[in-house]
Image (cartoon, rainbow, N blue to C red):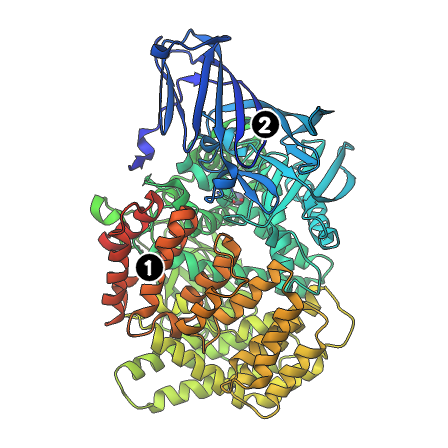
Amino acid sequence: MTVYRNDYQPFPYHIPTVALQFDLDPEATRVTSLLSVTRRDGVAAHTPLRLDAEDLEFVSVSLNGQPCAPDRFVVDDTSLTVLDLPSSCEIEIVCITQPAQNTSLMGLYVSGHSLFTQCEAEGFRRITYFADRPDVMSTYSVTLRANRSQYPVLLSNGNLVEETNLDDGRHECKWHDPFPKPCYLFALVAGEFDLRQQQTYTRSGKAVTLQIYSDPGTFDRTEWAMQSLERSVRWDESRFGLELDLDRFMIVAARDFNMGAMENKGLNIFNAAYVLADPETATDANYQAIEAVIGHEYFHNWTGNRVTCRDWFQLSLKEGLTVFRDQEFTADMLAEGLDETSAASARAVKRIDDVIMLRAAQFPEDAGPMAHPIRPESFEEISNFYTATVYEKGAEVIRMMHTLLGEQTFQSGMQEYFRRHDGQAVTCDDYVSSLEWALQAEHPNRNLDVFRRWYSQAGTPHVNVELSHGPEDATLTLSQRCEMVGVEKSTGFAKQPFHIPLRIGAIGADGSKRYLSVHAEGEQAVQTGESVLLELTQTQQSWRISGLIKNDILSLNRGFTAPIEIAYEYSNEQLAALAQHDPDAWARWEAMQMLYTRYLLAQTQAADTTQNDTPAIANLLALVIDVCNATLGDSKLDQAYITRLLSLPSDKYLLQQMQPMNPLSLARAKHQLETTLGMNLADQLMECVAQSPVTQQFDASPEAAGKRALRNLALGWLNLANVEQAKSLATHHYDSANNMTDRLGALRALLLSPVRDDRVEAALAHFYDRFQNDPLVVDKWFAIQASAPGTGLKTVSQLLNHPAFVFRNPNRLRALVFQFCSNNPLGFHAPDGSGYRFWAEQVTRIDQSNPEVAARLARMLDHWAHHIEPLKSHMQAALKSVADTPDISGNTREIVTKALTL
Ligand code: TRP
Ligand code: ZN
């Protein structure tokens, strides 16, 4: 069933208080729910009270203490409707749920020996009958009862009120959360855990207890998570002026979890992958992800919990904003304590990583069958809309407003947002209006009218740039267009221009600096500086620029101020100059990406049309090698940044620029380019590896992590190129590694070597042997093999039958099945279509136990129609076979039918 944003109606009743009682038992948990209910003003008497349900066993309902007469209520599989209510009453509902049978990991479920809940978006209805929508906010009191030895820890939101021992070996904990919240923020946890806790004080002096619960035996691995939490608390105070409002803030790690983590009020539940870390078992990337996710969930306490969403179409209200906040948090942490130049470079690295993600996941989404604005107009399953668009593009939209307003005005808009809406469930528009208020406090005649279109229009805008030199100054003309995408195509509405902030600059052909003076046509105001911010709000606009001479090179979208594609006719030499001299670190990286892209696309096109190497391609390759050479030799650059400069663009982004998409020839071209770079730069790469021996004591600083990243890239290229000594070097690095980044980097390099000999097998076997009792590391072992170039379906089926493969665990599925389908082009896109048939089997199999995870896997063939034959027909057949499977979930159905029809 399709739900439309425009159909929003408030719920006819208020439910100010909820008292829940749980008799916890994995086989059958009895839930008693006591609701105070009052009819909203203006709602007709006799309006039925309809509560949502899923997979519940109904026991009883009573009204004001009396069992409800059978003609006063209707109960079916998805609802309980109570009729003829007085304007105010108490309703008590008893039902039973079966956590051990719950494989969907939504609602109350078993993971390991413990019980967890996941309620966002619509999981609370799997716990009890309720108005499962974010605009119904209540104060919760929760009583948990369970066997004391099996479940010594019983947690829920808010504050612990009372703990009592009962007879028959059980105990009882009572919790009270003073903050009204929607039911998607409810949580409970029961089990046995290690606990790390620490006291801290908020800026205003209030004492708070921070707690991290994790599986017994993992205490030593929660130190980094605790430090990250403490830094999150401090950062939200210093940058946003927002304090923790609770006496106690808890994080619990779960092994089985559908996504990254969940911001339940005062009781965040995390995928253990985003909590547990020590140098032996976690990579530098894991460390950074843990800090970012802990920050993200913590920041939701204000952006999401104190102010929540009116309906699920407003999801980006909390997610886009909170991603923006966690991105800024990470950038601030990376830049902390560095001098100005190093800080700028550290921030650029973070910005680059975010743009890589956006381009690999969101740009393709915005051009495919699931394309939607950051505030969707309709959906069938809300869980399918926890997308890169809502999250990552949503964050870009917030970032553009931040760029337009500036930090100070943006923060004053944030303060206004909390002044207006604290304790409410609101819309994206309410948020934009608060920022607009702050903008107008300084510039009364400015507004965000045009800007708001980012919320209602999907697609990635394309901006065309033209520069013409006149006798005195130059004219820069920008024009924009954005194709109709996804469901927009069938609605036929006319797209309007976006409000696009575009930071630009220029350098001389010799790399020298330029100061620009820019002047919008028909306006008086002039902007000057090394960089200027243009605001494109119409289909086409021009600016007069002085300070540019004939052969100067434009540097566009510096810092990636807008999530757009830019078209400008650069020569190869101009790109090479920017890639070596652009003072803006982001734009310098971008130039390198464009150079790589140009080469790879030319190469794949030549291969697909069976042309021989042309001199033009050979020249371009020589230029690429030169620039890489210069980059490696640039001692002013830090190594994390060099690693980004040298890394090739993602397949997903490159495929977008290929018509038709040919993932096989692209994979070959990338392989060939990296091999060539490995051969041509062998000496320098060897130097990188030698410079930082792995035997030193482990150093967790970003600088040391940068060194490890570059060394791993070098080891990989050298092994791809099969350079003499490369393999023994990788073996040596594997053996002497004192941390997971080095160990995994060396193992990955070994798997890249064209010769798969005993040394590779021995390292793989050793890795498993050593870490087999550590699920998060075993995931890495599966993932690295699933994505290795030599891995085909045969190896994947062996791995599926490996005793360590656990089908019900989403992390394990992501490590093997998802990795193979998304990160192993040569294996997955086998021309006989076997990879796609495997995909279809896995989607339908996973769908029976966990529809949300299945629907994510289902997304992998979104772009089937743009592929080259015979891949296209094979993909279409695989999609059809999933669509034709009887009893497929609504989640998966939405994805495959949209893919087949849009
Ligand atoms: N709101 C969570 C976040 O972004 C993510 C989330 C949404 C989630 N739905 C979920 C997590 C279902 C696990 C399962 O932080
Ligand atoms: Zn979130």
> Quarter-wise, where is residue 869 in the image?
bottom left
Quadrant holding the N terminus: top left
Q: Amino acid at mark 2?
A: Asp
Q: Is residue 544 above or below residue 536?
A: below
Q: Which residue sits at x=59%, y=27%?
A: 23
* Numbered disc 2: secondary structure: strand
Q: Which residue is mark 2?
A: 23
Q: Is residue 584 visible?
A: no
Q: Residue at x 57, y 52 (%)?
A: 327
Question: In terms of depth relative to the viewer, which is nearer, 526 or 758?
Answer: 758
Please tell me whether residue 298 is drawn above or below residue 370 in the rendered image. above
Disc tally is: 2
Horizontal side, residue 380 vs residue 274: left or right? left
Residue 8 in view of the camera:
yes
Q: Which residue is mark 1?
A: 840
Mark 1 burial class by Cα count in 10 Å: few <14, some 14-19, many 20+: many
Q: Of residues 591 and 312, which is closer to you in this image? A: 312
Dividing the picture into quadrants, the one containing residue 870 is bottom left
